[in-house]
Amino acid sequence: SYVLTQPPSVSVAPGQAARISCGGNNIGRKSVHWYRHKSGQAPVLVVYNDDERPSQIPERISGSNSGNTATLTISRVEPGDEAVYYCQVWDFGREVVFGGGTKLTVL
Amino acid sequence: QVHLEQSGAEVSMPGSPVKISCKASGGIFASSSIVWVRQVPGHGLEWMGGIIPKSGVTNYAQKFQGRVTMTTDGSTGTAYLEMTDLRVDDTAVYYCAKDPSVVEPVGTAFFDPWGQGTQVIVSS
């Protein structure tokens, strides 16, 4: 089955940029979606189809996807961005796959 | 604005079944699918499967095939997840979410919005 690999944690100071990677074999050929999950809350879609943003998500959150790595970038990180972020794809073998999640810590 | 409201927490015995619900507002059943995702404590998100309410077609993750049944009631706009033969390691928060696609198989698109989650505790 298809595997998505994310770093367990990323730490960044407020105002700096955070980059969260999602590795997978030829992931650039798939559509990647990203979710923000805060403890005790429902996950929230922040990027879909590699680089599109839902209307309520600010422009400082963006996505890219090429080769074997998709990346979620959060510019000018704020304390409220602290959460676990998951990438997700559709495996053409008929199943949804989530990455293991990356905990973003704002220092 | 679409909103998914899930049923309350459940405590079940090992070996018993559980059925949780997800009521959708906004009349989404005609134009979208419903998926179910769970999070076991200390673990990440895990996709369980989904259903196209308009046709009743389902797509279950291989891990859960034979143990889960997903259904919908169009008259009330409610989706259901039933899981049988519960085990202690099925203790988790279960989420429903809207998938904007009605193309088979279910799960090829993204999920937005999500319900608030239903805690299921399996314990003797």
Image: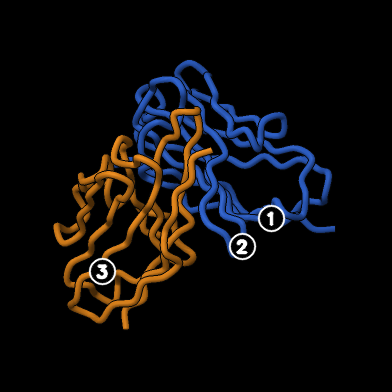
Q: Report the quarter where the N terminus of chain B lies.
A: top left
Nearest to viewer (mark 2 / mark 3): 3
Q: Are marks 3 and 1 on the same chain?
A: no
Quarter of the image for residue B49 reads top right
- Classify mark 1: helix, strand or loop: loop
Q: Residue at x 67, y 31 (%)?
A: B65
Q: Report the quarter where the C terminus of chain B lies.
A: bottom right
Label 1 chain ID: B
Q: What residue does disc 3 label?
A: A18
Whole-percent x, y for residue B41 in the image: 61, 62
Q: Residue at x 21, y 48 (%)?
A: A53
- Find the distance from the CA under tag 1 to the CA under tag 2: 8 Å
Categorize mark 2 by other alpha carbons within 10 Å: few (<14), some (14-19), many (20+). few
**Which amino acid lies under the numbered mark 3 shown in the image of this protein?**
Ala
Looking at the image, tell me whether mark 1 or mark 2 is earlier in sequence order.
Answer: 2
User: Which one of the lettered chains is coloured blue?
Assistant: B
Label 2 chain ID: B
Whole-percent x, y for residue A90 in the image: 42, 35
Q: Are marks 2 and 3 on the same chain?
A: no
- Find the distance from the CA under tag 2 to the CA under tag 3: 26 Å
Q: Looking at the picture, tell me which residue is in the foreground, B18 or A12.
A: A12
**Which amino acid lies under the numbered mark 2 shown in the image of this protein?**
Pro
- Using the image, determine if residue B76 lies above or below residue A96: above
**Which amino acid lies under the numbered mark 1 shown in the image of this protein?**
Thr
Q: Residue at x 56, y 54 (%)?
A: B39
Q: Which mark is residue B91?
A: 1
Q: What residue does disc 2 label?
A: B41
Q: Are marks 1 and 2 in contact (CB under 8 Å)?
A: yes
- Classify mark 3: helix, strand or loop: strand
- Using the image, determine if residue B57 lies above or below residue B86: above
Q: Residue at x 72, y 54 (%)?
A: B89
